[in-house]
Amino acid sequence: MVELKTAAELAIMREAGRVVAMGLRACRDAAAVGVSLLELDEVAAAVLAEHGATSPFKDYLPHFAPTPFPAVICASVNDVIVHGIPGGYRLRDGDLVSIDFGAGLGGFHGDAAVSFTVGTAAPADEELIATTQRALDAGIAAAQPGGRLGDIGHAVGTVGRAAGYGIPQDFGGHGIGRRMHEDPSVPNEGSRGRGLPLREGLVLAIEPMFMAGGQDKYTTDDDGWALRTPDGSRAAHIEHTVAITGDGPVVMTAL
């Protein structure tokens, strides 16, 4: 069921979104050569604690996973597309890192992700990240009241395909509110003018994820969570929680 949020509920979601933005900024600031992914998880957990927020990631158990997720961030490095479990891996110069983070506050949630390079960035990685950001911006711009869900997928997918990148077909964005994952699903490809009508009060997590190698297939790690590119090419993932209002789309997970 698709749930439309009231103005009061959107205000609460905006506060949860600010916590998400602060956590992502803190992780990015802390990410340096030699820092472990588990240490980044601790940074994000401290932000949640400081603001009295909860983690919608920790202990989350979706249908595709064999065990609950054990951390408050997803930390995906290089060829990991999404859902990397943070552990003892220590960041190296040139690593492409994607951090996905959520926060619950006042009964509502925010969810966002960033991709960045640690240390010296390869030009191809910079272009992959920049293109993923452009796709997100295009998807947000398409999230207009009176439009259709397919408009968002078309905007995102057009940017990714023009760059020659692969798009994992089974994963994309989602509705968000009282639960981190709500209806509707938000595919990263679609047809203009098709799909669910976009109405005021609808809140969506829009999240392009692109694979530099150009394939749409992926593999899954033995932990059942991390998705990897099948050819070892790099991937980027960038996300915002976006509310559809009478004035247009509003990013909820920005400072």
Image (tube, helix red, strand yellow):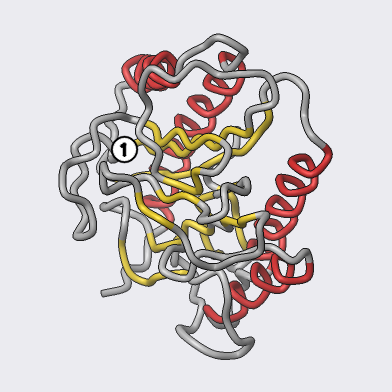
Q: Is residue 236 left or right of residue 112?
A: right
In the image, what residue occupies the spot 30% across and 22% down? 52
In the displayed structure, 233 sits above or below 43; it is below
Q: Which residue is mark 1?
A: 104
Q: Residues within 10 Å of mark 1 (few under 14, many from 20)?
A: many
Where is residue 143, by image quadrant?
A: bottom right
**Among all residues in the image, which is located at the extreme front?**
231
Q: Residue 246's spot in the image, x, y percent?
A: 59, 68
Residue at screen point 49% across, 16% down: 90
Q: Nearer the viewer, residue 45 or 4?
A: 45
Q: Amino acid at mark 1?
A: Gly
Question: Which residue sits at x=45%, y=47%?
Answer: 82
Going 66% across and 57% down the picture, which residue do you hit? 213
In this picture, is 46 found above or below 2? above
Picture coordinates of residue 96, whole percent (x, y): 63, 34
Image vertical order of residue 10 relative to residue 20, above or below: below
